[in-house]
Amino acid sequence: MLEKLLGAIKQKVSNYFLGVLPKSYSMSEENNILGLYDEHFLLTKNENLVGILRLEGVSYTHLSTEQLQDLFTERQMALDSLEKVVARLVVKRRKIDYKQNIQTDSQYLQAILNQFENKEVYENQYFLVLESTHSLQGVLEHKKKSLMHANRENFKDILSYKAHFLQETLKSLEIQLKNYAPKLLSSKEVLNFYAEYINGFDLPLKPLVGGYLSDSYIASSITFEKDYFIQESFNQKTYNRLIGIKAYESERITSIAIGALLYQETPLDIIFSIEPMSVNKTLGFLKERAKFSMSNLVKNELLEYQELVKTKRLSMQKFALNILIKAPNLEDLDTQTSLVLGLLFKENLVGVIETFGLKGGYFSFFPEHIHLNHRLRFLTSKALACLMVFERQNLGFKANSWGNSPLSVFKNLDYSPFLFNFHNQEVSHNNAKEIARVNGHTLIIGATGSGKSTLISFLMMSALKYQNMRLLAFDRMQGLYSFTKFFKGHYHDGQSFSINPFCLEPNLQNLEFLQSFFLSMFDLAPSRDKEALEDMNAIFSAIKSLYETLYPKAFSLLDFKETLKRTSSNQLGLSLEPYLNNPLFNALNDAFNSNAFLNVINLDAITQNPKDLGLLAYYLFYKILEESRKNDSGFLVFLDEFKSYVENDLLNTKINALITQARKANGVVVLALQDIYQLSGVKNAHSFLSNMGTLILYPQKNARELKHHFNVPLSETEISFLENTPLYARQVLVKNLGNGSSNMIDVSLESLGRYLKIFNSDSSHVNKVKALQKDYPTEWREKLLKS
C-alpha cells in the first residue's frame, strides 16, 4: 500500500515538472526562432533578439601570473556588466580533417607529406550568446530616463529599443574581452550556429534577412531515450548524452576540469547558461541566506559579499553548467561519458547523466528556454570567471619566406593543429624580400636519446618541398646518414672531402671573405701593431697576386704559401704548416657543391679539431649563403653539437655575424645542444641567443637556468612542462622569441609508419642501410621500407 502511495506521489511530481515541457515535439516550434531580424540578430517568437560574439581565445602557456590575473579580472568585469539579458557561453569542440595540398617531384617525399600532414585534429570554438529579455515596462523606463536626460533617441517600437540595447551590450563586451579577439557574428552565422545544434552537423544556410523562416534548416529527427538522445539524418546517426553538474564539492572553484575536457580526443559542447541577477535581487538573496545561516563565519562572508555587490565589484547569476557529449555510436558514447565523469570527479565536480532533466536540459539551450534547465543555481561572477577559460592554442603560421605553406604540421597537446615553422612570424613567400627581418634561426636543446636527430632530419626533409631550397648539415655519429642517402643527397664522409676557398670568384665580397678567413686561420685580429699590420698586408697581397696571375686556373693553399712574402714576425709560414699537411684544407678540388640541394658533412670522420671545425663551418656557411643570394633561393644550415664550432674567439664572432647576415638572405640556421649547461659553455652565448627567433626545448630538469642566466622569458607553466614531462613522451616546447608565445607540441613521428625508419639515427640502422646499399644498389630504398 505504501509503495503504491509513494509511486502515485512520484508520478504527480513528475507530471508537474513535465508540464512545462511539450507533450510532442515539433523542432520548428520548440526552438523559438522566428526569423532574421537584421544583419546581426535573430528574432524569437516572443519578440526578443539573439546575437552572438565568437571569441578566438588566447593561449595561456606563456603568460605570467600577473597577466593571468588581469585576464581573470577582465572576465569578471564582463560578467558584472551584464544586465537585462540571458547569456550562454558555448564551447564547441569538434574533430576536423586537416589537409595540405603539397605537390613535389619526389615520390617518397610526396608520400610522406601526404601521410603525415593530413590528419585528424580537434578545434575549440567559443561563442558568447546573448538574448534580450526586456518587457514593455523596461522600454517605458528607458524612455523616461531618456527624456529626463534630454536624450533625443527615439525608437519606433519595442524591437528597435531591444536591438539598440543588445547592440550596446555586445559592443561593451567586445571592448572588455578584447584580448580574446571577439567578433560579432552575422544573423546568418547565428542561424547556422543553432542549425548545427538542432541537426547534429553543420548545415550551411543562406536565409534572407527580414523574412520568416520555414523549417528548411531542420534536417534531422531527434529521439529521446532514457539517458541519451539520437539525431538522425541521411542515414547518419549522432548519439548525444547530457551531463549536468550537480554539485561543487570543493571550497575552491577552478578551471582545471574544464581545461582537461578540452584536451581530450572527444567531440563535445560545454554550455554555461547564465541569467544575471540585478543588484536588488542579489542583495535580497544574500540577506535571506544570512538571516537563516547558523554560522557566524558564513554570515560575515555574506556581509562582505553584500558590500562588494553594493559597490558593483561583484555580481551574482543564476547559472547551470552542462556538457553535451557526441559520438557516432552508443559504445563510444559510454566510453566518452566515463572519461568525462572521471575528469569531473577528479576535480571535485559532481557530474550526473541527465535522465529526468534530459529533455528540459536540451530545450533549455534555445532562446527563452533557460528556465527549463533544472540545474540552475546561484553563483558569483568571481566563481564563474574561474570556470570560463577561453583557452585556444596558437595555430602557427600558414606560410613562411620559403613558400606558401608551413614547414610541417604537428599537434598541440589539446590535439589542435600546429603549423610549424622555424620562422617566428608569418610572411607570404611572395613578399619575403620586403620583410628582411623575418627570423627563423632556431636553437634546439635536447639530451642524447631525446629524438633530436630524428626530428631535425624529418624537418630538413620537409624543407625539400620548397623550390630551389639548399640544405647544409654538420652531422655527428652519422645520425643523418640514412635520411641523406634515401633522398639522394651528398653525404661527405672521410678523407675524400676537401675544401678550397680559392675556388671562389674574384669579386670584392669574396676577396674580403678570403682575407677574413685567412686572418682567422693565422689567429690574427685587426690591430695597429706594426708586426700585425705587416702580416695582414702580406696576406692581402698574396691573395690579390694569386688571382691576378693564376685565375681562372685552379690554385691551392700551397700556392698561397709560396706567394706569401716573408715578414718580420716570421710566423706566417710556420702557422700554415699544419694546414698544408691537412688534406681537408690543402687541395685543388673543392668537394662542396653549394648548388646541390642537400649536403651533409660527417665531422667525426673529417676533423675533431675545434679550430678546424670553426674554419670549415665559416667557409661552407659563407658559400651557401652567397649561392642563395645569387640565385634568390632559401637555405637551411644545421649545426649539431654547436658549441664545438665556436670555441675559437675569432671564429665565434664571425660565425655569429654570418648568422645575422643569413637572415637577410632568406636563410635559417638551426643550432643544437645537448643541455642548457652546454649553452653556458658557449662564448658569447647571449649574443647567439639574441640572434635566435625560435627555441625548441626538450624536457629537462634545469629549465629554470634559461630564465635566470639567459633571460629567456619562460613562464611558470612552461618551466613546469619542461621539468616534469618525461623524455619518452616525445613532446617539446616551441618558444617564439619574437612575441614570447609558445606551444607544447607532440613531435612523435609514429604516424609515418614504415617511413619512420628513414629518419632512424641509430648506428645499427646505419650499418643496415649500408649493407642494403651494397647488396641492392638500385633497390635498397624499397628493401629498407619493406624490412
Image: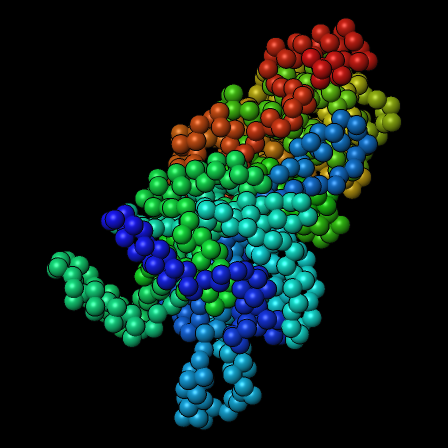
Q: In the rendered view, does 417 fall on the left or right side of 69?
A: right
Taking the view exactly as shown, the residue that stands out farthest to the front is: 1
Nearer to me, 713 or 208: 208
> Could you tell me residue 695's position as x and y percent?
53, 38
Q: Residue at x 65, y 24 (%)?
A: 753
Q: In the rendered view, does 301 fall on the left or right side of 530?
A: left
Residue 37 at least partly seen: yes
Q: Residue at x 60, y 37 (%)?
A: 410
Quarter of the image for residue 205 reads bottom right
Residue 707 at least partly seen: no
> Could you tell me residue 502's position as x and y percent?
77, 26
Quarter that holds the C terminus:
top right
> Could you tell me residue 167's position as x and y percent?
53, 74
Q: In the rendered view, does 606 fall on the left or right side of 547?
A: left
Quarter of the image for residue 319 reads bottom left
Q: Residue at x 29, y 75 (%)?
A: 280
Nearer to me, 482 or 60: 60
Nearer to me, 787 or 3: 3
Position above or below: 174 against 111: below
Asked which colour scheme the image uses, the reply is rainbow
Quarter of the image for residue 616 reads top right
Q: Residue at x 79, y 18 (%)?
A: 588
Nearer to me, 366 or 378: 366
> Could you tell me residue 463's position as x and y percent?
70, 34
Position above or below: 229 against 602: below
Q: In the rendered view, does 550 fall on the left or right side of 127?
A: right
* Count of picture labels: 0
